[in-house]
Amino acid sequence: MLWERIAIFIFGVVFVAAILVLAFLFPNPTNFQYEICRIVLALACAGVATLLSGFLEFEIPKFIKAGGALAVFVIVYFYSPASLVVDEVRVVESIRSSVDKGWNTDAEFELSKSLQRFPKNPDLHNLKGQLNLQTRNYLPAANSFSQAIEFARDELSTNKYIYNRASALILARKYAAALKDLTRLKPDHSPDPAIHFNLGLVQSRLGHHKAARASFTNTLRLDTSTQREFAAEVELQRGVTRILECGHGGCSNVFVDMAIKNFRDAVCKKSDLRQIFLNDASQIELFHYSDEKKIISGILTAPSYIRFRRELADGKLCWGNT
């Protein structure tokens, strides 16, 4: 009957539309969800095919032979292109799990093999960048993040990959390039303290000490977490930029005291930083710059800094701090 065929056709159109909606609501379906969707999609396509002209015959030798709408069902069910997408998602999740556990040869091999299968997957390029960071291959990491940016599918992912590339460039000491990336993230409108912290590091290393100190201040203002170690790193860098901001004219006692307060807050939040100030080589390295010897000499010989180091050595610095 004609009305029966029309009803089946309407059923097919409705469920095809429903599958399209569900595909966007659940972009990463579970195995069960995927199987249900595949069956419904195959039935829906077969329903649509009932009113299409022509005759289709399909055969898998020694397994199945079908014609018409049933052939459409078999083709969609057994050769669904959606399986390729789901497979790609599963590969990414598997690689991410391996990378999160740390670098190993198996993770590197699986990642290389997966990139051959899915060369335009931005998440895989991002994971390759993270793997390179773990092995301290900073420039190759930045190149991988660049590939991720090229194939990124939305603005949120793009910004994440840009931030990762900037972090890799900082570690590679490519500060000007890192500054360009961080500027693309519009830090003036960003509530992310990590962006402001990295911006401060880059500005400091490029000699923009006043701007760097402002960035570190913004970092502390925006940081609502209770991570004392991160706050300690920020305080440490605030102190460094205060000293370097003085220039070759030398620091006033007030400025030195403010910097030492930053150092004191940093050490009391993260005791590991204590060794930086007790070791002559490491405390000079803290200021990063070989051309700032006058500034470094000035801070190292300041009475308040000498007292600060003595209190550190005696273990009395953080008494009363929580």
Image (tube, grey):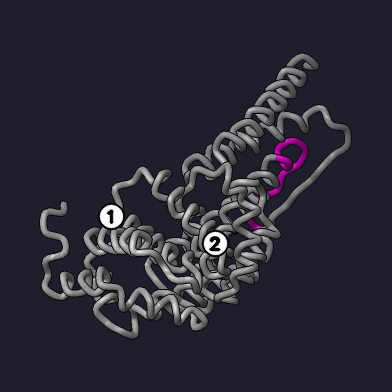
Q: Which amino acid is tagged 2? A: Asn
Mark seen at residue 298: none
In primary-sequence order, the first of circles 1 and 2 is: 2
Residue 116 is left or right of residue 137, and the answer is right
Residue for badge 2: 164
Q: Is residue 264 visible?
A: yes
Q: Residue at x 54, y 44 (%)?
A: 190
Q: Is residue 109 magenta?
A: no
Q: How many marks do you count on the picture?
A: 2
On the image, the x and y values in percent for residue 56 come to 81, 43
**Which image quadrant is residue 208 in?**
bottom right
Q: Specify the amino acid type for callout 1.
A: Arg
Which residue is rendered at x = 12% and y = 70% of the image? 315
Say whether marks 1 and 2 touch (CB < 8 Å). no
Residue at x 25% of width, y 62% of height: 264
Q: Position of residue 96 (x, y in %)?
A: 47, 61
Q: Mark 2 packing: few (<14 Cα in 10 Å), some, or many (20+)?
A: many
Which residues lie in the magenta part?
62-72
